[in-house]
Image: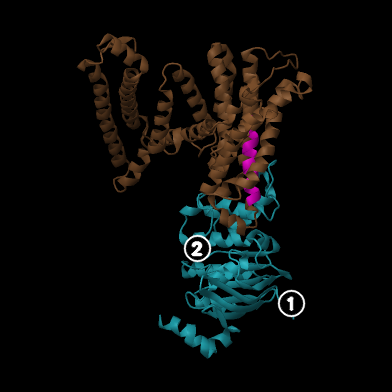
Chain colours: A brown, B cyan
Amino acid sequence: MTMRTPLLPALAAVAVLGALPVLLPAGLLNASIQALIAALFACAYSLLAGRAGMLSFGHAAYFGVGAFATVHAMNALGGTGLLPTPLMPLVGALGGLGFGLIAGWFATQRSGTAFAMITLAIAELLHALAPQLKGWFGGESGISTMRMPAWCLSFGSTTQVYYLTLAWVLVSLALLYFHTRTPLGRLTLALRENEHRLRFLGYDVHGLGVSAFAVSSMFSGIAGGLQVLGNESANYVVFDAGVSATVVLNSYIGGVGSFLGPALGAALMSFFGYAVSDTTPSWLLYQGVLFVLVMMFMPEGLTGLVTATLRLLGRHGVMAVLPLALSAVVAGLLLAGGSVFLVEMLQRLCSQDYRSLARMSGTAPPVQLFGRAWSAAAVGTWIVPAGLLAAGALMAGVVQRCRRGLALAASPEVPERAAALSERALP
Amino acid sequence: MNDPILSLRGLRKSFGATEIIRGVDLELRPGERRALIGPNGAGKSTLFHLVSGNLAPTSGEVIFDGQRITGWAPQRINRLGLSRSFQITNIFPKLTVFENIRLALMRHHERQYTFWRVIDRLAGLRAATETLLEKVRLQAQAQTLAGEMSYSEQRSLELAMTLASDPKAILLDEPMAGMSSEETHYTMELIREVTAGRALLIVEHDMDVVFALADRISVLVYGEVIATGTPEQIRSHQGVREAYLGEEAAA
């Protein structure tokens, strides 16, 4: 459930995050701001989906309401703003909390599929309504705003915005962590485990559900507010189903079973998106494939992989696990390389440009990929991905054998248990 | 004579065309320990569900502590002071035993919506949890996941969670099922001790427990109470012997 974060690694992580503006170029720093916001949003979402066990499919609604509340607060009083710039996300928090209380009161009347459908409907309702309500949501073009200088800071540079975002995200994560240690936080966990029993212990289960929903929405609203602070604008596309889907995927890739898992998943995926979206138009495909693979082979997410590896290390020692880990990494790289080559080749061959080029020249012109020209007709071109995939499959076989070996060495009498354990360790 | 703490009046429950509870009248006095016995399928658990708010009766009424609680939500009934255990163990299997008991105690300590204090720092709650753990002899298992304990240990946990709210009346549904004779004996003494001054309604198949623990016994057969009396009266009751005790002895 909640892992006790040791203080030292946490401080080290904060130090690294604090040093990023010095280490990173401006483009990557902007991506880091987005990653921080995505991390907070995923953590807020996981309070509801992971700890309270209520799968919301419409969390964009609370992120979006937070965003629009913030943009209106920034534009209030003739542009001077309701609050000093650094405190603006508070308005996002209030917006998320308020709307979360209302939406949560309805949604938590039901559980399971019905709950998911209600949350989805609420988000879709906002998405459909927002472009019509020009005064509130600025129509199709959205609402733009300006960060006002405050507290002797101009908030004109990316670095200042980064530090403001970092401060808010760290404080919010600390509060979310604190929530897990409070009686209300423990009850949230119990809500997921056995709602029926809670009733017979005298608890108001609906009230608990609304509270989990509202707290999650409040922190989602802060994330939305931070995005507005960064972008200096808000647009109705924040209510898009894609935003709701991304937070679900990010959280589950990271692992909703742990506190920081969703944050790590979201940060990784937003950097992945930043790095890959410029390079290839197929990046959404890669994101989807990654999600399916994670769900199939490590349903506990990336943190599940980490804990399983640590467990293996603890049981067998570094020397025994090293061959398994290395062969798993090599197998993963080979299979990924082969698949990426194949996808990219096919994507280029099937593109409009290439087909018209081929039609004009009457031949199959070579394709530029990875700094080389590949002939589509040559056998050699297709041997590369085939070879990579075959080698990857072979390595996967080696991984299987290593695993079985470890399992046998661990406990000859119960091999199934050990195999099941190490299974979770594999990508 | 005291007013009854719990009375059931003309209670009926049907599932579709099948009537499971066919007009039950029952009165439980404060401090009384009452056993409810009857063959399988007599409706004992259904009766518990009707009293505790898990099911709404088709007709009739339930009066608890002077209030008509028919159709109330389970949490409202629990807060009025009526607590129950379940025949099928109903705990938080993926949380520790300590956490299970703490959760059960928290409501009574008015901590449901406390979000400003770290739970581990609530000394009173912690002490109460440890006392209760000790009482049901689970202190060695405090950090075990509840779902990983043996069945009889889970029964003890179930009992502890039921006691946590300091109730005026306790409904126990087969609390000793699956326990060894030593555990049964211990649990029986525990129930006797913790129910002092409270009303108890217990369903139990172990006749030794029933006759040793109960002040009075009611016999439920096919959704009707066919007899109520002291253990001696029930032991010698002809109808009961035919309907129930005879079968048990033969089985």
Which element is circle 2 on?
Answer: loop
User: In which quadrant will I find the C terminus of chain A?
Assistant: top left
Give the residue pinned by disc 2: B88
Cα distance in 3D space between marks 1 and 2: 32 Å
Which element is circle 1 on?
Answer: loop
At a point 33% along the width and 32% down the height, the residue shown is A320
Name the amino acid, label 2: Ile
Q: Which residues are magenta?
A: A206-222
Residue B56 percent across, percent down from the top left: 60, 66
- Relative height, residue A118 to residue A27 (above, below): below
Residue B143 percent across, percent down from the top left: 53, 49
Q: Residue A218 lies in magenta, yes or no?
A: yes
Residue A125 percent across, percent down from the top left: 60, 37
At a point 53% along the width and 59% down the height, the residue shown is B90
Name the amino acid, label 1: Asp
- Relative height, residue A264 to residue B97 (above, below): above
| Residue A20 sits in quarter | top right
Residue B236 percent across, percent down from the top left: 54, 89
- Relative height, residue B63 to residue A181 (above, below): below
Q: Is residue A111 left or right of residue B113?
A: left
Q: Which residue is at the front of the view, B124 or A89?
A: A89
Give the residue pinned by disc 1: B3
Chain letter of disc 1 in the image: B
Q: Is residue A397 left or right of residue B91?
A: left
Decide if residue A89 is in sight here: no
| Residue A117 sits in quarter | top right
Q: Residues within 10 Å of mark 2 (few under 14, many from 20)?
A: few
Q: Which residue is at the front of the view, A119 or A266?
A: A119
